């Protein structure tokens, strides 16, 4: 019997050979009966999963949060977020080739920097995906209401689309007797689709992503007719007393919009369900990043050019309102709202999907209860995960104001990205995986990962104090969970005995 010290337990790593063995057991051929995931997702569908979880989130919703912080320089905020995500995407690409596994940055951390760090990353990912799904479903409610208003002249009653817990002038406020019903309905629909199977969900997502891209192209063309270069002056916000003048406003806005790059991480969570993952995952990550960056910058430039920055604050269904103001007609806003209602469905679908697969991977390693790794024998879907995740996401979306959620999602994403960047030099130094061929981070194992870490920390520093407080509480719960349950029940712990 081998007894491990506490330090050895915290830093024990999962061998790539073991990961490959697990993935082989779980990667069943289509039509093969058994209790596992199977490889049914190709490059196009995988890229659309990444785009679906990214494009839309930061454009349809967060301009109303980000522009008041940065003014017209919100364009730089999107660019800063894109560069940071791009640096990390290169790290993801190499890790996904050398460590082909579901679980994304959690699995990469487990194979390189150790079990405890991997569990912390998993906690960040669960926070990231869960709150992102809640936040996007809340934004979907605004566009649904805008569509119903323009199409039928009917509004959803305020008490049925207003959260109970809101951010007031004097802190947190509670408003009994009201809740946000549309997000709950959306989460239920996503859950029902996910329960049908990964292939069906990926196909539906690809269709919705194509609709989304067409709608955003429609917005760019129509809104450009109202483009006014004077709206970019002054380019930077002056200091408003909250420390958000100049570049401080840009980094604060970058922190708000950064969560919208969550889709890049989602691509890597699908490792166990992707055909030829060592090639498909890196290509999917890079392709999705390029599509996402172009879309974000185009829409942000045109939106700010078509409307003064001061008008963005508190604006619901912002892109629809811009089109209505530019054209003086309701039909362009109606088209965009209808497209948003369809396409934002895909964002929520992808983020819920990602969270269920993270739970699956962590449970498979024994760090959370086994109930989260049970697979339905016919649909090959982790049913318990899907139901539990949808329940939590639906409750948060129905009762909590989205203003609490944006920065929290970014915090979880940035911490996960930092660990992914750290994993690359560790992987190279330990010679983990087959590095003789395939994608490699350019300029050696330190420059790009180091720049990625610096960029993430640069954005993190301007997140709100409330974000830090809530994140500290969440991390405290995660650490307690690991020491009370995960450390003792880890599969690696049993192997060491």
Image (tube, rainbow, N blue to C red):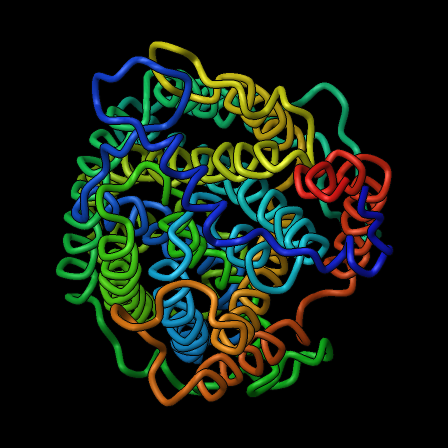
From this view, report whether residue 202 is shown above or below residue 332: above
Pick whichever, 296 or 352, lies toward us.
352
Quadrant holding the C terminus: top right
- Estimate the x, y position of residue 30 in percent, counting from the top left: 21, 23
> With 191 as the anchor, is 458 left or right in this view?
right
Image quarter of residue 400: top right
Q: Nearer the viewer, residue 120 or 98?
A: 98
Where 332 falls versus 326 (above or below)? Answer: above
Q: Is residue 420 above or below residue 214?
A: below
Residue 461 found in image quarter? bottom right
Image point 42% across, 80% down: which residue? 76
Let me know if residue 318 appears in the view. no
State the residue at coordinates (53%, 19%). 374
Q: Residue at x 50, y 45 (%)?
A: 18
Q: Residue at horizontal 48%, vertical 35%?
A: 357
User: Does residue 298 appear left or right of residue 477 in this picture?
Assistant: left
Q: Please identify the quadrant where the N terminus is shown.
A: top right
Q: Which residue is at the far top?
A: 378
Between 1 and 272, the one lying in front of the other is: 1
């Amino acid at each position: 019997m081998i007894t491990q010290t506490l330090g050895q337990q915290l830093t024990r790593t999962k061998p790539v050979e073991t990961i490959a063995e697990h993935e082989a057991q779980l990667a069943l051929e289509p039509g093969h009966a058994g209790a596992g995931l199977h490889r049914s997702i190709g490059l196009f569908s995988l890229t659309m999963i990444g785009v679906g979880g990214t494009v839309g989130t930061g454009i349809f919703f967060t301009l109303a949060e980000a522009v008041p912080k940065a003014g017209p320089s919100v364009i730089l905020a999107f660019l800063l977020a894109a560069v940071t995500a791009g640096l990390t995407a290169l790290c993801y690409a190499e890790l996904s080739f050398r460590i082909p596994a579901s679980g994304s940055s959690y699995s990469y951390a487990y194979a390189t920097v150790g079990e405890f760090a991997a569990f912390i990353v998993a906690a960040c990912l669960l926070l990231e995906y869960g709150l992102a799904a809640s936040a996007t479903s809340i934004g979907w409610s605004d566009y649904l209401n805008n569509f119903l208003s323009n199409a039928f002249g009917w509004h959803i009653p305020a008490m049925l689309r207003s959260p109970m817990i809101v951010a007031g002038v004097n802190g947190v406020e509670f408003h009994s007797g009201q809740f946000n019903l549309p997000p709950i309905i959306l989460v239920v629909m996503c859950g029902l689709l996910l329960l049908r199977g990964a292939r069906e969900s990926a196909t539906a997502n690809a269709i919705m992503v194509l609709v989304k891209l067409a709608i955003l192209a429609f917005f760019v063309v129509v809104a450009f007719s109202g483009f006014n270069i004077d709206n970019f002056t002054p380019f930077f916000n002056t200091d408003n007393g909250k420390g958000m003048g100049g570049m401080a406003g840009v980094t604060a806005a970058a922190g708000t919009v950064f969560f919208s790059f969550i889709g890049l991480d989602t691509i890597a969570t699908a490792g166990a369900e992707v055909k030829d993952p060592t090639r498909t995952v890196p290509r999917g990550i890079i392709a999705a990043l390029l599509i996402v960056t172009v879309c974000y910058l185009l829409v942000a430039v045109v939106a700010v050019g078509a409307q003064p920055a001061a008008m963005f604050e508190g604006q619901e269904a912002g892109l629809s309102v811009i089109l209505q103001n530019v054209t003086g007609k309701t039909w362009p806003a109606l088209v965009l709202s209808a497209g948003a209602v369809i396409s934002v469905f895909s964002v929520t679908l992808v983020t819920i999907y990602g969270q269920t697969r993270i739970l699956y991977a962590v449970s498979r390693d024994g760090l959370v209860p086994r109930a989260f790794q049970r697979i339905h024998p016919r649909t090959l879907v982790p049913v318990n995960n899907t139901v539990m995740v949808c329940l939590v996401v639906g409750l948060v979306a129905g009762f909590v104001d989205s203003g609490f959620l944006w920065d929290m999602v970014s915090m979880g994403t940035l911490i996960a990205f930092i660990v992914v960047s750290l994993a690359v030099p560790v992987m190279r130094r330990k010679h983990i995986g087959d590095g003789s061929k395939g994608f490699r981070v350019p300029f050696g194992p330190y420059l790009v990962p180091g720049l990625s870490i610096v960029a993430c920390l640069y954005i993190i520093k301007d997140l709100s104090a409330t974000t830090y407080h809530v994140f500290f509480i969440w991390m405290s719960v995660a650490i307690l969970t690991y020491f009370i349950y995960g450390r003792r029940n880890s599969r690696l712990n049993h192997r060491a005995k």
